[in-house]
Image (cartoon, rainbow, N blue to C red):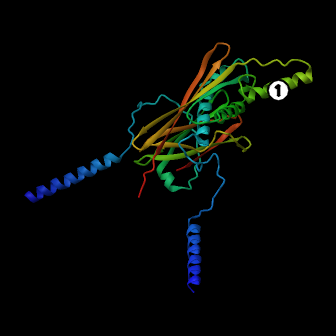
Amino acid sequence: MNHTRSKFLAASAMLAAAFLLGGCETTSDTRTVDAKGPQTLNTSAINPQDWANAADQLVASLLSSGALEKAPRQPAVLAVDRVINNTALSIDTDLLIKKIRVALTQTGKVAVTNTMGLGERAVVASEAAEMDEMQTGKKAKAQKIDYTLYGKLIQQTDRANNVTQNTYTFQMSLVQVSTGLTVWEEEREIAKQTKRASVGW
Amino acid sequence: MKNHLRFIITRGGLLAALGLLFAGCATNVNTVERAQSQATPSYIADKRVITDNTLANTFRVVAINQTTVSGNLLKLQATVENLRNSTKTLNYKFEWIDKDGMAIDSPNETWKTMLFEGRETKTISTVAINPRAVDFTLKLRE
């Protein structure tokens, strides 16, 4: 009799525990959001909106400066030089550079060459040149470059009370290859403040 | 007489305290500019569709003007005023349309965020990266 009662109590306890744990469980909820929309997550890092915003402002500044109007030919040949990442974030700088390349190419004022620089773009250009040489029997002649574009990403972190502020600076310069002169420069900043959550009891 | 004087002092003190309280909260912006503007902007006659009255009562698009940059690219500038006495956030997005009425997609035309101090007027601008762009839509949300 006692044995049956203890079995019943154990079963009841297990059932109650199952209900309790079941109540705590939450199902994962994933939804597709517009990557260009205001629903994207805002974190202390650089989010897709920040990249697009920085690229848009830099391109608008370059086009408004009139620097490309003074190019020796249309479209001017542009090579993307280094983009130095001096932030604490592990980021692919193509998140910025590709947007700028796409925008500048769409204007029709710039043709971007891949024959300069390191990485996958240079490999693609090298393979394309080899393919052309193989097909025509002639060594491909690289286009003369009119401008090079280089940039730098900087992060400054400031803390006061419970607030951390990360300021990301996007710097970009356009250099005329024939003269070595910087014909356009711009700097844009995005500042993000994060308040540390207080612990409640 | 004494009671009357005390009432006036108390009421005055209360009003002063209230004044200080509200002055402490205000983040309004005062501005100074040239009396006779030398600029001659090219303003655009616009058509407005309001679906959010709260937003319309918070932000006012004062004017939109345009110019051409890099030879054949349209540049737009909208002057926006925060009608409230406190800091407000505005989300905005420009979209471009070609002469056939087709939307022109751009990787950089996303929703952007801008902070306005109380009663502050700011400009938001964009450059069409495609020379085919002739028309635009400016979208606003809080």
Q: Position of residue A170 (x, y in %)?
A: 57, 31
Taking the spot 51% from the left edge, 46% from the top edge, the residue there is: B90
Taking the spot 68% from the left edge, 34% from the top edge, the residue there is: A98
Farthest residue, direction bottom:
A1
Q: Is residue B136 visible?
A: yes
Whether A113 is drawn above or below A57: the answer is above
SS class, disc 1: helix
Q: Residues within 10 Å of mark 1 (few under 14, many from 20)?
A: few
Whether A63 is drawn above or below A21: the answer is above
Farthest residue, direction left:
B1
Location of the N terminus of chain B by quadrant is bottom left
Task: Work out whether residue A75 or residue B135 is closer to the camera in this orientation and state it.
Answer: A75
Task: Work out whether residue A21 or residue B133 is closer to the camera in this orientation and state it.
Answer: A21
Residue type, mark 1 in image: Glu
Farthest residue, direction top:
A179
Query: In the rendered structure, the residue with mark 1 lies on which chain?
Result: A
Q: Position of residue B9 (x, y in %)?
A: 15, 53
Residue bearing mark 1: A127
Q: Left of B13 or right of it: where is A183?
A: right
Q: Left of A72 or right of it: where is A166?
A: left
Q: Position of residue A158 (x, y in %)?
A: 45, 36
Whether A83 is drawn above or below A161: the answer is above
Quadrant of the rendered structure where residue A70 is? top right
Q: Is residue B76 visible?
A: no
Whether A119 is drawn above or below B18: the answer is above
Taking the spot 59% from the left edge, 74% from the top edge, the residue there is: A15
Taking the spot 27% from the left edge, 47% from the top edge, the residue there is: B20
